Amino acid sequence: VVGLFGLLLVPVTNDGSSFSGQLIGAATIFFWVFLTSLLVWGVLKAVMGIRVDEEEEYTGLDIGECGLEAYPEFTSVRP
């Protein structure tokens, strides 16, 4: 948000730039990041998946990945 704000404030301090040019630049950056992220997440989902199974959601990732319970008072399943 702050980067977008700074990008849009450039015409206030620089006579050689236009507000419409800054908007086009901001839109270009947004669409580039959106499409690149969509591609990367799509590849990750196809190759290895981006979610854990339902059982691991309930027991917690601390147990599944580290073998420890970091916050046992917040888990619904007791070992």
Image (tube, rainbow, N blue to C red):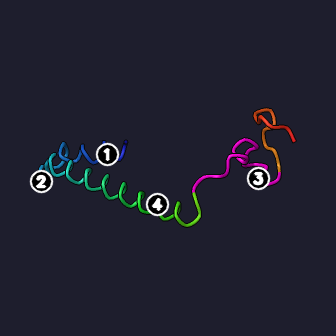
User: Residue at the spot x=20%, y=52% of the render?
Assistant: 24
Q: Which quadrant would the N terminus be assigned to in this image?
A: top left
Residue highlighted by disc 2: 16
- Determine the image quadrant of residue 37: bottom left
- Determine the image quadrant of residue 8: top left
Measured as percent of width and height from the top left, residue 2 is found at 37, 42
Q: Which residues are magenta?
A: 50-67
User: Residue at the spot x=22%, y=47% of the render?
Assistant: 10
CA–CA distance in space, label 3 to label 2: 56 Å
**Element at label 3:** helix
CA–CA distance in space, label 2 to label 4: 40 Å
What is the total number of numbered labels drawn onto the structure image? Answer: 4
Give 10 or 65, whichever is nearer the viewer: 65
- Of circles 1 and 4, the one toward us is 4
Residue highlighted by disc 4: 42
Q: Earlier in the sequence, mark 3 or mark 1?
A: 1
Q: Classify residue 2 as left or right of residue 14.
A: right
User: Residue at the spot x=76%, y=43% of the render?
Assistant: 59
Amino acid carrying label 3: it is Gly
Give 46 or 38, whichever is nearer the viewer: 46
Dominant SS of magenta comes to: helix
Residue highlighted by disc 3: 64
**Element at label 1:** helix
CA–CA distance in space, label 3 to label 4: 24 Å
**Element at label 2:** loop
Q: Classify residue 73 as left or right of residue 16.
A: right
> Quick check: is 41 in the magenta stretch?
no
